[in-house]
Image (tube, rainbow, N blue to C red):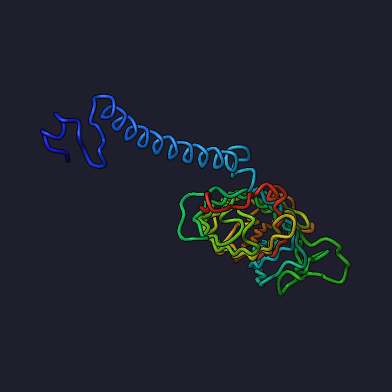
Amino acid sequence: MPLEHDRENNIGPGFLKWTPAVIFLQKLRAMNLRVTRILSLALLSLFGITEARAQFDRWPAAIKNIEIGYGSAKTWADYDRQVKAVREDGKLYDTTISMSVTSKGGFSGAFGTSLPLTRLGRASRLNLGLNFIYNTYLWDYPTANSARLTDSGIRYDYSGNILFSGASLNYGLAISADFKFGVDAMMDKRYRWSWTGGIGVLPSMNLTSDFGSADANFGVQPFAKTEVGLRAGIVWKLRVMYQAGTLKYLDVKPKDSFFGIPNAEQTTRLTGKGNLSISLILMPFSWTYTRSSWYNSY
């Protein structure tokens, strides 16, 4: 800092004359440097925000993460049929058939999306999964084609060829907390593979029809799922999903006479014990994923 007598004699370091104009230029230069830095930071920030908006606003995550799935489904259930008949002489017959049954064929469909909730790590997120699930099952339990009342009770005849034992439709909205890692977690083409593990609940409607009866019931099941994915043009995933808990498929008391037996009452119950589906999931809008670079490595 020059001394006061140096200022008065207009003498400074390097023989610089300290005139008001020089002092003003020095201050202006310092101000220009600060303004330039501020503008540079503002432009960089604006550029980053513009790039981020271009990535995420043009195609919302709900669209990017749309999933369509097709696969096979299987379920297990307890089948119970109880028939009570009163003979003309007043004797009561109570016959109950109970067995564990398995569906012999099933189709599974899925349509939904995944919404990012929070980032968990460098390449992982917690998402909200929303999927409409559609499962159909064909049952393979023995169906009698006739019955008669004897002195020892009700005798069933299974000799006929019954082509249709029964079928069930299970559909509802699967709501889950999904831990995601990789390409569909980050919606970024830098990644090729993905993995998802999720748990949730599935409220569902269940429609069932068998030989001579039909029913509709509402149920709620907890479920768990896991997925492995590969990006090849779009993202393809293999999903395994298990719905635990019981479902009421059938619980009816038909008013019609039971195979013509007078004074007979029957109760039929079919109670599900779990559902398993294996599906191929494709994400048709995952081609809109962007590829991050140095300024937007999220």
User: Residue 224: x percent and y percent?
Assistant: 55, 63
Nearest the viewer among 228 and 161 is 228
- Residue 21 vertical position relative to residue 201 in the rendered view, above or below: above
- The answer to whether residue 92 is visible is no
- Residue 197 vertical position relative to residue 46 in the rendered view, above or below: below
User: Residue 5: x percent and y percent?
Assistant: 11, 33
Which quadrant of the view contains residue 192?
bottom right
Looking at this view, name the residue that lies furthest to the right: 161
User: Residue 9: x percent and y percent?
Assistant: 16, 30
Nearest the viewer among 178 and 247 is 178
Residue at screen point 73% across, 66% down: 103
Residue at screen point 63% across, 68% down: 78
User: Residue 184: x percent and y percent?
Assistant: 61, 56
Looking at this view, name the residue that lies furthest to the top: 20
- Residue 54 vertical position relative to residue 103 in the rendered view, above or below: above
Q: Quadrant of the N terminus?
A: top left
Nearest the viewer among 179 and 293 is 293
Residue at screen point 86% across, 63% down: 163
Nearest the viewer among 12 and 160 is 12
Whether residue 291 sits left or right of residue 9 in the image: it is: right
- The answer to whether residue 48 is visible is yes
Which quadrant of the view contains residue 13?
top left
Looking at this view, name the residue that lies furthest to the bottom: 152
Whether residue 188 sits left or right of residue 166 in the image: it is: left
